[in-house]
Image: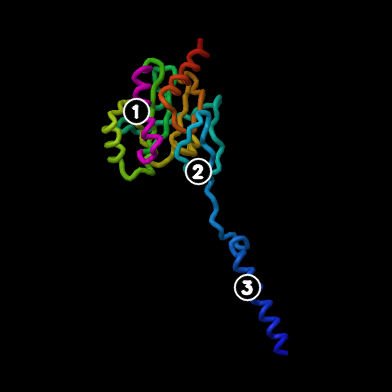
Amino acid sequence: MWRNILSVGILVSLIVVVLVMNANDLFNLEEQDPNIVDVTGDTSAEGVTITAPNVSQLQEGGPAPAFSLETLSGDQLEAFDQEQDFIFLNFWATWCPPCVDEMPDLQKFQDNHQDKIQVLAVNVTDVERSRNKVDNFVHDLDLEYPILLDEENEIYDLYSIINMPTSFIIRTEDQQIMKRINGPLTYEQMEEELMSLTEDKR
């Protein structure tokens, strides 16, 4: 009898061990990876990857959604109410190192091509510590192109952003997305992108 009890005890112990070792799989308690997407993009440069919902990304050749946002200076700006042929729409945050590196090049790019393209920088304000931090950042870098404040992530979601920085080059006349760049660009890459678009237009 004692032998049977001992056998049952050993069997129960083995079952408990197996259950403990496989609890994560059985009850789906294993920490799941967030919806992280490879964002190297055409530039072969990685940005800061962030979690995003499973949404269909806006693609080149499709229409860019129209929107209006308040700027850092307090004005309301209609994104596509611009005189230039193209808009360089950039999504960024102050805590994103690749964004910080890219911002001065965007200013240089705007200064050298202000007759052809307008840079609009959409700050994802909802993930910033404060609006003052954005203000100080822009002031310290002496940025002059419009800084738009997406305080509720509405435009971020509208443009299916999966990482920062993300940029769109949009043709103003018909709001067509000419280029989507998931990740940062160097000044030289910005020049190349604009040159390819202006050559195609001839």
Amino acid at pointer 3:
Val
Amino acid at pointer 2:
Ala
- Residue range of the region highlighted in magenta in the rendering: 94-113
Pick whichever of labels 2 and 1 is earlier in the sequence.
2
Choose between 115 and 182: the one closer to the eye: 182
Q: Is residue 85 magenta?
A: no
The local secondary structure at tag 3 comes to helix
Left or right of 137 on screen, residue 62: right
- Asked which quadrant contains residue 13, the reply is bottom right
Q: Position of residue 107 (x, y in %)?
A: 34, 25
Q: Position of residue 22 (x, y in %)?
A: 62, 64
Mark 3 vs 1: CB contact within 8 A: no
Pick whichever of labels 3 and 1 is earlier in the sequence.
3
Disc 3 target residue: 16
Q: Residues within 10 Å of mark 1 (few under 14, many from 20)?
A: some
- Asked which quadrant contains residue 16, the reply is bottom right
The local secondary structure at tag 2 comes to loop
Q: Which residue is at 41% across, 27% downward?
A: 79
Distance between the alpha carbons at the discs numbered 2 and 1: 27 Å
- Asked which quadrant contains residue 121, the reply is top left
For the question of whether residue 18 can be seen, the reply is yes
Q: Position of residue 11 (x, y in %)?
A: 69, 77
Disc 1 target residue: 104
Disc 2 target residue: 52
**Magenta-highlighted stretch: main secondary structure?**
helix
Q: Which residue is at 45% across, 30% downward?
A: 167
Q: Nearer the viewer, mark 2 or mark 1?
A: 1
Amino acid at pointer 1:
Pro
Q: Which residue is at 50% across, 20% downward?
A: 174
Q: How is the image coloured?
A: rainbow
